[in-house]
Image (cartoon, rainbow, N blue to C red):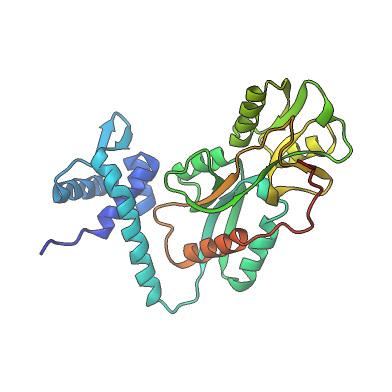
Amino acid sequence: MSVPLDLDQLQSFCAIADCGSFTEAARRVNKTQSAVSMQIKRLEERLGHALLSRDGRSVSLTQHGEALYSRARKMLKINAEVMDLFDDQEMAGAIRFGVPDDYAVRLLPVILSSFQKTHPRIIIDVRCAASEELLAGMKQGRYDLICFTQGTNREYGELFRTEKVFWVAAQGGQALHMDPLPIAGGQACCWKDNAIEVLDRLGRDYRVAYTSSNALAIASAVLTDLAIGFLPESALQPGMLAIAEDKNLPRLRDAEIALLRASHAYGGIYDALARHIITSMGNLETADPLPIAAE
């Protein structure tokens, strides 16, 4: 009978895979770098294959490491679930949570306030940023959980909501009818990339009139008729005209919203918040429908 793998070794392996650094991984698992190196050596000896490729200071997964990573994550998740099954203490602790600021105005206060009412001893440190920044922050160890929009990285995210992305303009505004078409979007934004792609394909003349990493600033540019933008259905705001598709504005790709965890963020307080977000946003229906232009 084969000896089971060591979960502590798998935790260190996943931490290295997450951040690409032995030094940072050692900090995350609260061990010395030499102890983590020894763990990986023993894990590689146990499996008979190199799991990590070292090139100077950077560390990446080998083919065998890639095969192990997702399975190691599952094992850590199951272990956390078993521990929770026998833990009758009230959940308490702190969670570093990142979310795209497109959702911060309409959704975040409602979702998190309801969670705090049912879990008063869990403290949530929330940071709003663009999805690309959140993914980079996760790699750097700044978050335990993030929500992000797919199109940037779908490899390990847990997809839980898909919704239409609308072209948005100020109700009664003129920006929608200008030539070239003024558009507003984020600096690194998969929706802006998709909008430019479909406008190029249509041969529609446009100019990027307003660029910001702040979703509120983009929304303000739209609402004050400086430009048109693009938002998922649940992030639409009063005063906006939403256009799914017409002869001058082709349909955009749907928004795919996913949850990504750090490799340690399973069980307990992390599962509680993850379940709440997935349930709240996954079942969300847009309240107070906004004007939708005829297609």
Q: Position of residue 163 (x, y in %)?
A: 62, 49
**Residue shown at 39%/42% (left/top)?**
19
Going by the image, does 149 lie left or right of 42? right
Residue that extends furthest to the left in the rendered view of this protein: 1
Residue 161: percent from left, percent from top: 57, 53
**Can you give x and y, in whole percent of width and height, for residue 111 in the image?**
65, 61
Residue at image x 35%, y 53%? 29
Going by the image, does 81 lie left or right of 248? left
Residue at the image position 78 percent from the left and 54 percent from the top: 289
Q: Nearer the viewer, residue 264 or 282?
A: 282
Q: Locate the C terminus and report the quarter of the image it occupies.
A: top right
On the question of residue 231 being in view, the answer is yes
198 w.r.t. 147: above or below: above
Give the residue at the far right of this rendering: 172
Where is residue 134 shown, x and y percent of the image? Answer: 54, 43
Give the number of callouts: 0
* Relative to 140, residue 126 above or below: below
The answer to whether residue 31 of the structure is visible from this angle is no
Could you tell me which residue is drawn at 21 percent across and 58 percent down? 5
Q: Is residue 200 above or below residue 84?
A: above
Q: Nearer the viewer, residue 185 or 56?
A: 185
Which quarter of the figure is the N terminus placed in? bottom left
Residue sitting at the far bottom: 88
Answer left or right for 241 relative to 122.
Answer: right
